[in-house]
Image: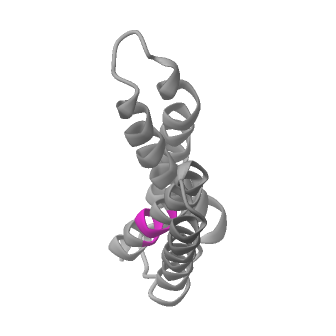
Amino acid sequence: MLLEFIIAAVLIAMGVMILINTINRSSDFQAFIASIFGGIFILAGIFVAAILGGFAFILFVKIIAFLFILFGLFLVIAFPDINRYQPNAFSSTGIFLGLILLTLGIFLLFLWWP
């Protein structure tokens, strides 16, 4: 079903965010451990998407995937620049959710076929 794709997108986005946040780590050991966990999340997301994928209505899924890509791009590109209205910590959340939606949308639009 579609739940497997959502789980895969969340795992891949968590892995990417962990790898991005390793730049700010103070010690090399913490960065190494965080990189290992980020890689594990990305590989687990790819495994879930490739092995446990299900079947859904093609046209509906493609339209939803296109909307996910548009909204994900907005969250990744435009949302973090709104510092006048929100704290800087909200930008990380917006980027994280945007990566989830963008990954899910790209997978469903281009790679998924029943």
Q: Quadrant of residue 87?
A: top left
Q: Nearer the viewer, residue 107 or 60?
A: 107
Q: Is residue 62 visible?
A: no
**Does residue 109 lie above or below 67 as drawn?**
below
Residue drawn at (48%, 37%) of the image: 71
- Compared to residue 36, the image places residue 94 above or below, namely above
25 in magenta: no
Can you give x and y, in whole percent of width and height, for residue 44 in the image? 49, 81
- Quarter of the figure with the C terminus: bottom right
Furthest residue in direction bottom, as rendered? 51
Magenta stretch: dominant secondary structure: helix
Residue sitting at x 48%, y 34% = 75
Residue at position x 57%, y 60% in the image: 19
Is residue 68 left or right of 39 when viewed as pictured? left
Residues in magenta, as a range: 8-12
Callout count:
0
Measuring from the top left, give residue 14's x and y in whole percent: 45, 62
Residue 59, placed above or below residue 84: below
Image coordinates of residue 51 in percent, x first then y, are 51, 90
Q: Give whichever of 44, 31 is nearer the camera.
A: 31
Say if residue 22 shows up in the picture: yes
Q: Quadrant of residue 43?
A: bottom right
